[in-house]
């Protein structure tokens, strides 16, 4: 039976994915065998991963080569996100992306630095014309790094189509050694309404998995009635790495009929935010585990393919059903779960009590909540579904339920600060209180008159917070009045313990210098190769400003020939 189902599903997959993608067009962006730290579309915080994370042996500085000929169409340098990123557009309409780079090739680096000095800004986004930076396949275009929000040295590599949709690079022949089947870690059953039950309970339950010798699983028999769904926690591993990566495809079958499929092949950036309704968001926020729902619940993802009855199983009394789950990776290694379900009304017990509060939020309506000096505006379609919300205000703290309900878009929080003295108002910001210690994390705050506002996508605690302490600035690799003739780099440490760094500016002898900010090490770095020093005596000045406007100035004298 498994062979027949596997053959059916494999043929279906093969036909659906008949490779319309060029197979010999794109070369590997790094020399040697590629080993992955992250796969395409694997589950990340608030998004699906848009490329391949290629390991660099925990090193930076590996040569990054153009995967195909074309031209540099975009360069973006940011403190966070992709850090230093390069985009190459190719004649066949695709674009390759190389991110978290350490630096660029000399020609590209010179082009960028010229623009950075013209704009007097490290963060920059450029769109060169096709004639400015032409590229030939195999050219060294950059060196691998750890910039931006990277958690360690690696190369992030993408292939995008004309619509800027990221597509799994493996579809283009980027080959990864993988003979290892996906790992099934847990399975959950969900009664989906008050009239549905699993094993006498009207709430989510973990289902015991029984391993088979061939690596597949069966479960203990389930008694159920009504509309139920399943969720799975699963990962994939490749042969040369132990990383817990994402799988390529999940399909389900009920009594021989296809029921649900999610195909991690291509998506748009506009939809990646919907990951939080694809996973069991409450479970993730409370247990730190991502359970993928195998049924469609307010979910507009294009990754969902063949979905019958939204993936929901309608279990009737006195029936026996066989439900199968197939999890596969790109190389078609697969793991199966077989679930035998007995439909019986004898499973019915008391229905679980639903949470109720005075505040019922309807997803398709705008809602304004106000108490004292604090107001919250939920716009239409802020949420995916209706729910009861906890809303409470105590002094300058807002209790806005727990962060267990996913949002589609941001909502607005407003604080009236008219009761504060004018001298204190400029030091106030809205903070999201994080963790059991309620650490105040800065939420981008705007002020208009006596009203402070912030936009957020997360429920939880918020509070007015005062930051009256300016950032700190310290020399990192030199001392005041030191000779630096043999130094390549000048480094300064900057920190701010509350609202965070907003901007900085550095000059030598009154002239702007470009300092690269690495927030993970709190370091500003200047490359002496950028400047032509004619003075022996040089005055360095660094001004750093935090997010409420406190600023500090650091000055030092150094000598250089």
Image (cartoon, rainbow, N blue to C red):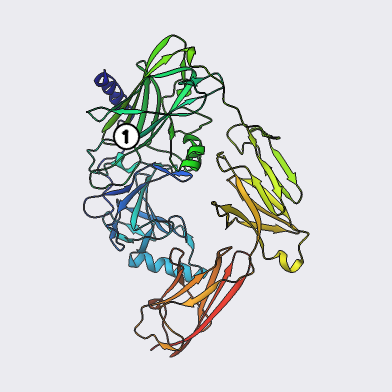
Q: Which residue occupies 42% across, 88% down?
A: 482
Q: Position of residue 170 (x, y in %)?
A: 30, 41
Image height of 58 relative to 96, above or below = below
Image quarter (top left, top right, bottom left or bottom right) of the C terminus: bottom left
- Badge 1: few (under 14), some or many (20 or more) residues near its Cα, within 10 Å? few
Total numbered labels placed on residues in the image: 1
Residue 397 is left or right of residue 264, and the answer is right
Residue 378 visible within the image: no
Residue 478 or residue 221, whichever sits in front: 221
Q: Is residue 325 left or right of residue 438?
A: left
Q: Position of residue 426 (x, y in %)?
A: 69, 65
Q: Quadrant of the N terminus?
A: top left
- The percent position of residue 175, horizontal first and vertical second, equals 25, 43
Hey, which residue is sitting farthest right in the picture?
419
Q: Residue furthest bottom?
A: 536
Question: Is 509 in front, or is 161?
Answer: 509
The image quadrant that residue 361 belongs to is top right
In this rendered view, identify the residue nearer to me: 350 or 292.
Answer: 350
Judged from the image, the secondary structure of the residue bearing numbered disc 1 is loop
Q: Nearer the viewer, residue 442 or 221?
A: 221
Q: Can residue 558 be seen from the camera position used here?
A: yes
Snapshot quadrant of residue 82: bottom left
**Vertically, is 247 above or below 60?**
above
- Looking at the image, residue 186 lies above or below residue 98: above
The residue at which mark 1 appears reads as 20
Q: Residue at x 53, y 19 (%)?
A: 349
On the image, the x and y values in percent for residue 403 come to 56, 43
């Amino acid at each position: 039976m498994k062979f027949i189902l596997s053959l059916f599903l494999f043929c279906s997959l093969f036909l659906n994915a008949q490779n319309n993608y060029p197979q010999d067009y794109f070369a590997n962006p790094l020399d040697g065998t590629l080993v992955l730290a992250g796969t395409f579309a694997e589950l990340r915080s608030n998004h699906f991963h848009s490329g391949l994370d290629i390991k660099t042996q925990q090193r930076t500085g590996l040569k990054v080569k153009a995967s195909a000929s074309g031209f540099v169409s975009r360069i973006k340098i940011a403190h966070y996100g992709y850090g230093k990123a390069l985009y190459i557009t190719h004649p066949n309409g695709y674009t390759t992306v190389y991110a978290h780079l350490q630096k660029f090739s000399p020609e590209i680096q010179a082009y960028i630095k010229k623009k950075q000095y013209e704009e007097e800004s490290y963060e920059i986004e450029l769109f060169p014309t096709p004639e400015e930076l032409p590229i030939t396949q195999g050219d060294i275009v950059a060196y691998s790094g750890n910039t931006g929000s990277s958690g360690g040295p690696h190369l992030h590599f993408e292939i995008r189509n004309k619509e800027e949709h990221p597509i799994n690079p493996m579809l283009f022949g980027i080959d990864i050694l993988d003979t290892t089947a996906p790992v099934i870690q847990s399975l959950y059953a969900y009664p989906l309404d008050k009239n549905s039950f699993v094993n006498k309970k009207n709430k989510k339950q973990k289902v015991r998995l029984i391993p088979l010798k061939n690596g597949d699983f069966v479960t203990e028999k389930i008694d159920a009635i009504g509309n139920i769904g399943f969720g799975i926690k699963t990962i994939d591993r490749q042969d040369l790495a132990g990383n817990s990566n994402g799988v390529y495809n999940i399909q389900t079958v009920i009594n021989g009929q296809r029921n649900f499929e999610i195909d991690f092949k291509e998506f748009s950036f506009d939809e990646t935010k919907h990951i939080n309704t694809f996973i069991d968001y409450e479970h993730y926020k409370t247990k730190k585990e991502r359970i993928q729902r195998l049924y469609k619940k307010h979910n507009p993802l294009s990754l969902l393919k063949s979905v019958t009855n939204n993936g929901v199983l309608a279990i009737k009394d006195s029936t026996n059903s066989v439900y199968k789950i197939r999890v596969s990776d790109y190389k078609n290694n697969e793991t199966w779960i077989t679930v035998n379900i007995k439909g019986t009304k004898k499973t019915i017990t008391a229905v679980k009590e639903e949470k109720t509060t005075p505040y019922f939020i309807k997803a398709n309506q705008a809602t304004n909540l106000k108490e004292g000096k604090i107001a919250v505006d939920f716009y239409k379609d802020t949420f995916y579904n209706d729910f009861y919300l906890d809303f409470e205000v105590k002094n300058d703290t807002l209790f806005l339920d727990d962060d267990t309900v996913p949002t589609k878009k941001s909502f607005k929080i407003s604080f009236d600060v008219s009761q504060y003295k004018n001298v204190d108002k400029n030091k106030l910001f809205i903070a999201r209180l994080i963790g059991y210690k309620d650490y105040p994390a800065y939420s981008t705050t705007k002020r208009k008159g006596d009203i402070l506002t912030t936009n957020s996508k997360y429920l939880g605690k918020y509070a007015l917070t005062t930051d009256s302490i300016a950032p700190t600035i310290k020399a990192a690799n030199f001392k005041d009045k030191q000779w630096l003739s043999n130094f390549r780099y000048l480094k300064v440490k900057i920190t701010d313990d509350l609202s965070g760094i907003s901007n900085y500016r550095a000059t030598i002898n009154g002239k702007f210098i470009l300092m690269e900010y690495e927030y993970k090490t709190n370091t500003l770095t200047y490359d002496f190769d950028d400047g032509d020093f004619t003075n022996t005596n040089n005055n360095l000045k660094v001004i750093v400003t935090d997010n409420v406007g406190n600023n500090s100035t650091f000055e030092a004298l150094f000598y250089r020939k």
